[in-house]
Image (cartoon, rainbow, N blue to C red):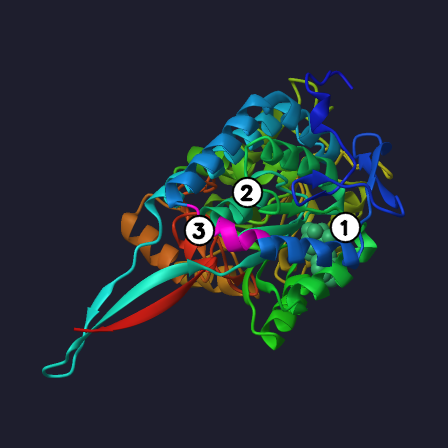
């Protein structure tokens, strides 16, 4: 690897519980690999349910005092954490490139985004969650109603591999900002990122037990999920991942009446009308298709273009891909596209591609995928249709499928004709149409003339099968607090 760590203290294989780096009694581990060459990077602790159970009890104990810290003190702690993340910028980025295959430049951006998550919620912690004063509506009523927001208690977080810093902090930072304590199970694939992030937490000065992070092998995930959703000391389960797993966890949380945040899969439509600025649309599509090798749930999944501009749009897109997208080592400055997170990801894309080609889609890009590799070439297809798997499933890779529509009504109908409803994009220079379409899209987030909508200040979340609740923005604080009404007699 063309990188040498300046701080080896960020690298570890142990879980972080009660402010300590534990050694498991049975020393059980599982392997983590570099997707670039499938070489083993490390063996990290494979914690079982009893370890997570202990961590929940510890987090519950820590909650008793952490919830009473002054909001400004919590803000200061989060700011100190953000400083630690900044101090380790290059090393954290390197772990991300090693484990996830993100280009080093993108990994640096991911660390910067993580810092913004922490500072944003540090500021919100200080502002605190204010309440309302509600007058009594009875004639001559002698009471007033006050509301306050209080931290729910222990929050359990399950996170995916695709956004191992900001995706984690969008859950942990708001929970800590309002006074909750946390037990976190990261994705096995990005265990080293989770460990390195926990190391920076450890240096920020929080009390023991406020944040606990335990890694486990993929086979253990279901048992840990069940524990989180049923443990009597857990008040909220926050999950980001597939709709199938989220649906199951939501059922379990429902059965036990636990609060939940579910950030699930998307299938974003990307609508380009004939009156759009095609250069803006093409540039935006590159941003929300090839960054992170397309492995982001809000990225464009179905490109729908008004019929009369299809040829023009496709030729501009093909030229932009050819000129801008360089597949190569994520450590090479010239690469703009690294490997997928794993060879598994490539297998799924191959299945979608074969199905599309069998059903009549046409391939316009020259490079083909080589079996057994996690490097997937930029791929452009036209004539994709609703019945193809590639339009029905999340692609999660650098593959664009383009199809056409004739009218605005048809565009909206096609865009909404899926079960998920996470993000959508619309390109037109007609402002009335822009609003009409943005309002008609059945999604939680719209990029109107832009493909870059990621920001911690944006309310992030979906409708329909894409989940429940919102992350980012001040709405995130509502997820981790309960509303209490106090009626006061005058
Ligand atoms: P992805 O396809 O992105 O890996 P998953 O939903 O499988 O999506 O994984 C997201 C996170 O959920 C990971 O941390 C994974 O280990 C965890 N996970 C997978 N299956 C379960 C389950 N049955 N219960 C709880 N967590 C799970």
For residue 44, what is the image quadrant?
A: top right
Residue where numbered disc 2 is placed: 169
Q: From mark 2 to mark 3, how far is it between C-alphas?
A: 22 Å
Q: Is mark 3 on a helix, strand or loop?
A: loop
For the question of whether residue 487 can be seen, the reply is yes
Q: Residue 138 carries which label?
A: none
Q: From mark 3 to mark 1, how far is it between C-alphas?
A: 48 Å
Q: Which residue is drawn at 62% across and 34% down?
A: 202
Which is more toward the observer, 207 or 140?
Answer: 207
Where 370 sits versus 459, above or below?
Answer: above
Residue 19 lies in the magenta stretch: no
Q: Residue at x 26, y 66 (%)?
A: 146
Q: Residue 68 carries which label?
A: 3
Q: x and y percent of residue 197 in the render?
A: 63, 35
Left or right: 344 in relation to 100? right
Q: x and y percent of residue 442 in the render?
A: 45, 62
Camera-side mark, 2 or 1: 2
Left or right: 286 in relation to 14? left
Q: x and y percent of residue 14 in the render?
A: 77, 39
Q: Which residue is drawn at 67% across and 33% down?
A: 196
Residues rendered magenta in the picture: 62-69
Q: Residue furthest bottom?
A: 139
Magenta-highlighted stretch: main secondary structure?
A: helix
Left or right: 434 in relation to 285? left
Residue where numbered disc 1 is placed: 348
Where 480 sits versus 38, above or below?
Answer: below
Q: x and y percent of residue 319 in the render?
A: 57, 29
Ligand 1, what quadrant? bottom right
């Amino acid at each position: 690897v063309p990188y040498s760590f300046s701080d080896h203290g960020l690298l570890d294989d142990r879980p972080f519980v009660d402010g300590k780096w534990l050694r498991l009694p049975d020393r059980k581990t599982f392997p983590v690999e570099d997707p670039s060459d499938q070489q083993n990077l490390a063996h990290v602790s494979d914690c079982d349910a009893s370890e997570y159970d202990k961590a929940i009890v510890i987090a519950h104990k820590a909650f008793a005092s952490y919830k009473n810290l002054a909001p400004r003190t919590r803000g200061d702690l989060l700011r100190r954490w953000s400083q630690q993340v900044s101090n380790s910028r290059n090393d954290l980025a390197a772990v991300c490139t090693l484990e996830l295959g993100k280009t080093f430049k993108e990994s640096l951006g991911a660390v910067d985004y993580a810092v913004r998550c922490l500072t944003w919620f540090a500021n919100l912690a200080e502002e605190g969650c204010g309440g309302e004063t509600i007058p009594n509506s009875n004639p001559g009523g002698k009471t007033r109603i006050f509301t306050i927001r209080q931290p729910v208690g222990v929050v359990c977080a399950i996170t995916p591999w695709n956004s191992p810093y900001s995706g984690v902090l969008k859950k942990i930072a708001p929970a800590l900002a309002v006074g909750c304590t946390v037990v976190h199970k990261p994705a096995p694939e990005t265990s080293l990122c989770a460990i390195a992030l926990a190391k920076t937490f450890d240096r920020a000065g929080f009390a023991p037990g406020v944040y606990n992070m335990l890694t486990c092998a993929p086979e253990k995930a279901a048992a840990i999920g069940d524990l989180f959703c049923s443990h009597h000391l857990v008040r909220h389960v926050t999950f980001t991942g597939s709709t199938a797993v989220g649906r199951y966890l939501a059922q379990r949380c429902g059965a036990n009446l636990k609060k939940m945040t579910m950030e699930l899969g998307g299938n974003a439509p990307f609508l380009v009308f004939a009156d759009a600025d095609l250069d803006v649309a093409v540039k935006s599509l590159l941003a929300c298709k090839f960054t992170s090798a397309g492995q982001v749930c809000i990225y464009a999944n179905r490109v729908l273009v008004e019929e009369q501009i299809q040829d023009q749009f496709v030729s501009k897109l093909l030229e932009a891909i050819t000129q801008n997208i360089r597949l190569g080592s994520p450590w090479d400055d010239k690469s703009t596209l690294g490997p997928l997170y794993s060879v598994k990801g490539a297998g799924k894309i191959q299945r979608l591609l074969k199905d599309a080609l069998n059903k009549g889609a046409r391939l316009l890009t020259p490079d083909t995928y080589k079996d057994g590799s996690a490097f997937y070439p930029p791929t452009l297809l036209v004539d994709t249709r609703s019945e193809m798997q590639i339009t029905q499933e999340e692609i999660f890779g650098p593959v664009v499928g383009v199809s056409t529509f004739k009218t605005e009504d048809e565009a909206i109908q096609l865009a909404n004709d899926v079960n998920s409803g996470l993000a959508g994009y619309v390109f037109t220079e007609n402002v009335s149409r822009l609003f009409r379409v943005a309002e008609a899209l059945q999604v939680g987030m719209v990029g109107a003339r832009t493909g870059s909508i990621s920001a911690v200040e944006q309310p992030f979340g979906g409708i329909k099968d894409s989940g429940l609740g919102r992350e980012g923005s001040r709405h995130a604080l509502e997820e981790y607090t309960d509303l209490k009404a106090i009626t006061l007699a005058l």
